[in-house]
Amino acid sequence: PPYSLFSLVCMGCSSSRDAETPTATTRASATTLPCSERCMRDSKRTARSRRHSRRIDVPSSLTLRAYEELGETSELRAGSLQQLRSELATLVEQRVAGWEDLQRALEQCDLWLVRFLRTRKYDSARALHALRGNLSLSRYLEGLPARTGGAKPGAVAAVRFWDLHIEDSSVRYVLDRRLLATVPGRARDGSAVVLLSPSSDFLVAWGRLGVGGFTLAVLKLIEALSLEPRTQLCGITVVVDLRRASSALISTSLRPDMLRLTERLASLLGSKAAFRVRGLWIVGAPWYARALVNLVRTFLSSKLRSRLHLCSAAEDLHAAVEERLLPAGFGAGGGADEGGAEASFEECLLALQRRESSTRTSLRSSSSSEPLVWQRPRHELSPT
């Protein structure tokens, strides 16, 4: 209980601090805060340090790769995190535009913040720019009109990115209908895999959740994948399966308001993403989707265009992802070995975590005592 915690802190204040400083007068002169306020401040700092102490090291087998590709060392990581937090705190104190979101970002754990540093090779200025771009996109999605994508006005409930969590209705809607999925393993280059399967179900989801709410739910799930240290280093491979995309879905996606959203999302992937995009695969685009694909290509940065792969057959994807990991429909025997066709998003995420290192305890057996960051109750952690 808060009172018991406060009592313990006060006991430490009257014992350990007296031992460190000669007199109570000297201790009082060191700070202008009264004892109660000082203890509450220190208790918050302790809780924040415990929350920020989650393991953020990459597996030992990838330490050399992290150094070669990112120049990462424990000293550089600690110093860059401190500098990023200092810059965020300064912006919050200056009450710049969107400072409330920056305050929420400042409250997140190191594992959440270090994603932006790793994708920008520990350039703090670029990491801060990417972080603010992510927050700006979230605000943009939250403010999308209900008519976007043809949704009926007033049929969409307002949603905020910070308030989303795994049990939120919009997130569960996306997961239960497998509008977004992942696989219980990694691509051949070590990246995590995200599967998007646009179909007529997308139109139903846009009408039910709103285009903004649907996109926020998808981004929240991708965020969950990006919280893995190995994924932060090896990146994410995005697969868009257009084989079931209807002409109605494509025509809706070509609406001017939807194209503006697509351009913003392309900008996120190109320069502001909190994860490294290792590949973008578009599978089985029908003839009536070629105009949309060509437009999307123009929105992408030159670096991302070089990683764009257009393939007519699902089997072409096997060059990037092993067939046994893919759901049924991506080749004969897809998902037979790993349960890819039936595995839920949570099961796949746990499988990725278990593969981080053979020396780590299985998260499936320890999930009750150490739940995922994005699944923790809000009273334990700020929603991420």
Image: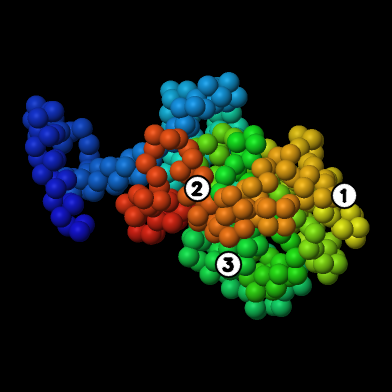
Work out whether 375 lies above or below 63: below
- Residue 133 can be seen in this image: no
* Amino acid at pointer 3: Asp
Work out whether 152 lies above or below 96: below
Label 1 element class: helix
Where does the image place residue 285, in percent across and percent down from the top left?
Answer: 84, 55
Say which residue appears at 35% left-offset and 49% top-offset. 366
The numbered mark, 1 or 2, whose residue comes first in the sequence reads: 1
Quote the CA–CA distance across marks 1 and 3: 31 Å
The crowd level at tag 2 (other Cα within 10 Å; few <14, some 14-19, many 20+) is: many
* Amino acid at pointer 2: Ala
Where does the image place residue 205, in percent across and percent down from the top left?
Answer: 67, 70
The crowd level at tag 3 (other Cα within 10 Å; few <14, some 14-19, many 20+) is: few
Instruction: Please give the residue where the numbered disc 2 appears in the rendered image.
Output: 351
* Amino acid at pointer 1: Asn
Say which residue appears at 62% left-offset and 48% top-offset. 325
Quote the CA–CA distance across marks 2 and 3: 19 Å
Quote the CA–CA distance across marks 1 and 2: 36 Å
The crowd level at tag 1 (other Cα within 10 Å; few <14, some 14-19, many 20+) is: few
Instruction: Please give the residue where the numbered disc 1 appears in the rendered image.
Output: 294
Instruction: Please give the residue where the numbered disc 3 appears in the rendered image.
Output: 176
Say which residue appears at 78% left-offset and 41% top-offset. 308
Label 2 element class: helix
Where does the image place residue 155, in percent across and percent down from the top left?
Answer: 65, 78
Foreground disc of the pair 2, 3: 2
Between 352 and 18, the residue placed more toward the observer is 352
